[in-house]
Amino acid sequence: GVCQQCSLDCRALLAKVAVLDKEERERKIKRMVPAFGFKGREALLRRFVEKPVGGNLWHADHIVPVHAGGGECGLDNVRTLCVLCHATVTAQQAQTGWGRKLSSSQRAATPDGDDDGVGSEEKEPEEKDSGVEEEIAADAQDDGQETGGVDTL
């Protein structure tokens, strides 16, 4: 539960705020992790305030992205990231070509023939709220904001 990018101890934060009522939980989270107050981070904050569980505060992230062949790697290719850092990493990957559309000849060369350049057997199942982190990261990027600003617990 410790973010490998910003060092936020997600388990400690969860333990401190899970027992609080929603209003106090939101105030404490914003005080302890100011980056949750940045524009574009509202959905991540709201999700954690509403349901304070680990999966709404930290994620497992592939160091070598799945689209670049990282899906076949072992546990040494996985790191823990807080949801704020994960949104930023995802946005950076999108800028480096992950979100680019393929030409029709490139698309025809992919095993499943779609635009993402990843064969269907390599794709991870979509999450219920897919795209939220990318949208949040894009909003923060448009405003020139970083996802840092984590206070020590």
Image (cartoon, rainbow, N blue to C red):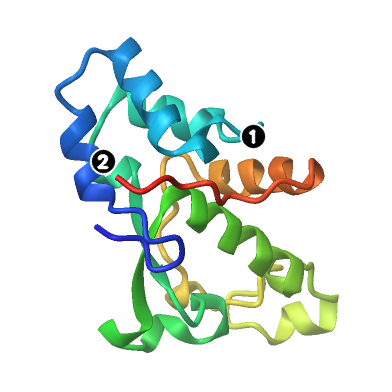
Q: Is residue 128 left or right of residue 100?
A: left
Residue name at image x 38 percent, y 21 percent: 26
Q: Quadrant of the N terminus?
A: bottom left
Residue at the spot of label 1: 40
Tag 2 residue: 13
Q: Position of residue 61 (x, y in %)?
A: 41, 67
Residue type highlighted by circle 2: Leu
Name the secondary structure under disc 2: helix
- Decide: few, some or many residues near mark 1? Use Cα within 10 Å; few <14, some 14-19, many ≥20: many
Relative to 53, residue 28 above or below: above
Q: Quadrant of residue 78?
A: bottom left
Q: Is residue 30 left or right of residue 136?
A: left
Label 2 packing within 10 angstroms: few (<14), some (14-19), many (20+): many
Identity of the residue drawn at 79% across and 67% down: 101
On screen, residue 20 above or below 11: above
Real-space Cα separation, disc 1 to disc 2, in angstroms: 21 Å
Asked if residue 60 lies left or right of residue 54, the reply is right
Disc 1 residue type (three-letter): Gly
In the rendered image, residue 37, in percent from the top left (x then y), is placed at: 55, 30
Q: Are marks 1 and 2 in contact (CB under 8 Å)?
A: no
